[in-house]
Image (cartoon, rainbow, N blue to C red):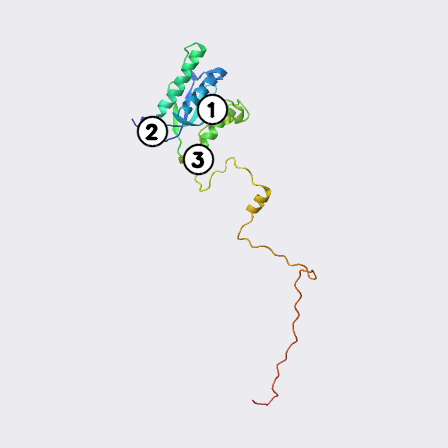
Amino acid sequence: MGWLTRRTSPGSTYFVTTKAWQSTSVFQVAQIAEIVISKTLEYQDKGNYLLHEFALMPNHLHLILTPADDVTLEKAIQLMKGGSSHEIHTIRENKLPIWQPGFHESRVSDWLDYKKRVDYVRSNPVAAKLVDQPQDWTYGSGSGKYQLDPIPQGLKPPTSEPLNVGAKAPTPAVAEAQTLSPATPELKLRPPEGHPLAAPKEHPGPHKEHAVPPEGRHA
């Protein structure tokens, strides 16, 4: 029972891995891969879950998702796997198994955990030597081709300042102004002696001697 509770925590985000039937490389067939991605995005659009990252590999699928409050993680994965299997069987006119039953999941705990999972998902095709760069793998979110949901509020990095993602670089004038501290006093240079702006040189006045009463004189 605890196993089910762990999977159905409302608002929780999960890193999920699910495999193809007997780990065969069925998803290396472009038509099948496109159907799987299409169905994954379809159930995202229908509001069954938030989709943050994914990578469809030749024989398995990685996902980072947040199920809707009224959808369990099991239901979210069942929709995607069942929907893609049905469409693949219909289009290709066969009933061969597509997915291995079940899946592996891990609840994302915080920002650092989230970032680690994202890096893993995006670099998976590179680690498998399928492409040189994450953006070259068309069957994953690293390609930048797909509309993904933003990082959940509870997993954002602990900072009081907004994330400057996509912000334009400041102009040279603004950048220079940002480097000056408002507490820094203006530096004034003294013009050389003889310069028109130089202050006139002060000369001491005549030295005044104090009268000393003659020796022996008393007031």
Point out the tag, 3 or 1, that comes first from the N-terminus: 1
Position of 70 with respect to 193 (left or right) is left
Task: Decide if residue 29 is in sight here.
Answer: no
Label 2 crowding class (10 Å Cα cut-off): few <14, some 14-19, many 20+? few
x%, y% of residue 58? 48, 19
Numbered label attached to residue 6 = 2
Position of 199 with respect to 105 (left or right) is right
Q: Which of 135/103 is in front? A: 135
**Label 1 is placed on what type of residue?**
Ala
Distance between mark 2 and mark 1 Cα atoms: 24 Å
Distance between mark 3 and mark 1 Cα atoms: 20 Å
Numbered label attached to residue 55 = 1
Q: Is mark 1 on a helix, strand or loop?
A: strand
**Label 3 is placed on what type of residue?**
Leu
Distance between mark 2 and mark 3 Cα atoms: 20 Å
Point out the tag, 2 or 1, that comes first from the N-terminus: 2
Label 1 crowding class (10 Å Cα cut-off): few <14, some 14-19, many 20+? many
Task: Decide if residue 118 is in sight here.
Answer: yes
x%, y% of residue 171? 58, 41
Name the residue: 48% across, 15% down.
Answer: 31
Numbered label attached to residue 112 = 3
Name the residue: 35% across, 22% down.
Answer: 75
Label 3 crowding class (10 Å Cα cut-off): few <14, some 14-19, many 20+? few
x%, y% of residue 82? 39, 17
x%, y% of residue 17? 42, 24
